[in-house]
């Protein structure tokens, strides 16, 4: 569940004080998992489109995708923790407005 030994990323960094252990795009509040979900999710964009939309280097997007692929267990753990927090706070229920 940790970063693969020996892998160094030029465009990714830890975020001190974050509740997330996964890496973020340098200088941005964008987690690697967010990039992965944008490219592989239900309404996917290409890595080139993501890079253009967020004005970041394509290499940063490709690093985030590589990182997410190599750290799926950590990312899933953090997704599960986030979902449990949402349920515990009752934010998963439809409001009756």
Image (spheres, grey):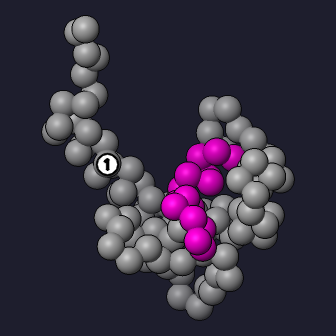
SS class, disc 1: helix
Which residue occupies 38% across, 77% down?
16
Judged left or right of residue 84, residue 75 is: right
> Residue 12 at what x, y percent from top left?
60, 75
For this rendering, which residue is in front, 72 or 86?
A: 86
* Residue 87: quarter of image: top left
Direction from residue 91 to residue 56 in the image, left or right:
right
User: Which image quadrant: the N terminus?
Assistant: bottom left
Residue visible at 39% across and 70% down? Answer: 21
Q: Quadrant of residue 28?
A: bottom right
Provide residue 20's location: percent of width, then percent of height: 37, 65
Rendered position, 55 above or below 88: below
Whether the magenta-drawn stretch holds residue 62 is answered as: no
Residue 27: say if magenta. yes
Instruction: Residue at the far bottom: name it.
Output: 6
Mark 1 crowd level (few <14, some 14–19, many ≥20, 10 Å Cα) = some
Where does the image place residue 73, in percent across and percent down from the top left? 43, 62
Q: Would you name the residue on which mark 1 appears?
A: 82
What percent of the width, then of the height, locates residue 47? 78, 53
Does the image show residue 83? yes
**Magenta region:** 25-39
Q: Residue furthest top?
A: 97
Q: Toward the viewer: 39 or 26?
A: 26
**Is residue 47 visible to the viewer in this orientation of the structure?**
no
Q: Quadrant of the C terminus?
A: top left
Q: Is residue 23 left or right of residue 76?
A: right
């Amino acid at each position: 569940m940790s970063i693969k030994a020996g892998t160094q990323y030029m465009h990714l960094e830890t975020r001190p004080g974050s509740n997330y252990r996964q890496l973020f795009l340098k200088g941005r509040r964008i987690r690697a998992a967010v990039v992965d979900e944008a490219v592989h999710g239900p309404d996917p964009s290409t890595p080139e489109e993501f890079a253009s939309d967020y004005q970041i280097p394509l290499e940063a997007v490709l690093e985030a995708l590589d990182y997410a692929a190599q750290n799926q267990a950590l990312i899933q753990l953090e997704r599960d923790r986030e979902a449990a927090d949402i349920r515990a706070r009752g934010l998963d229920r439809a409001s009756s407005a």
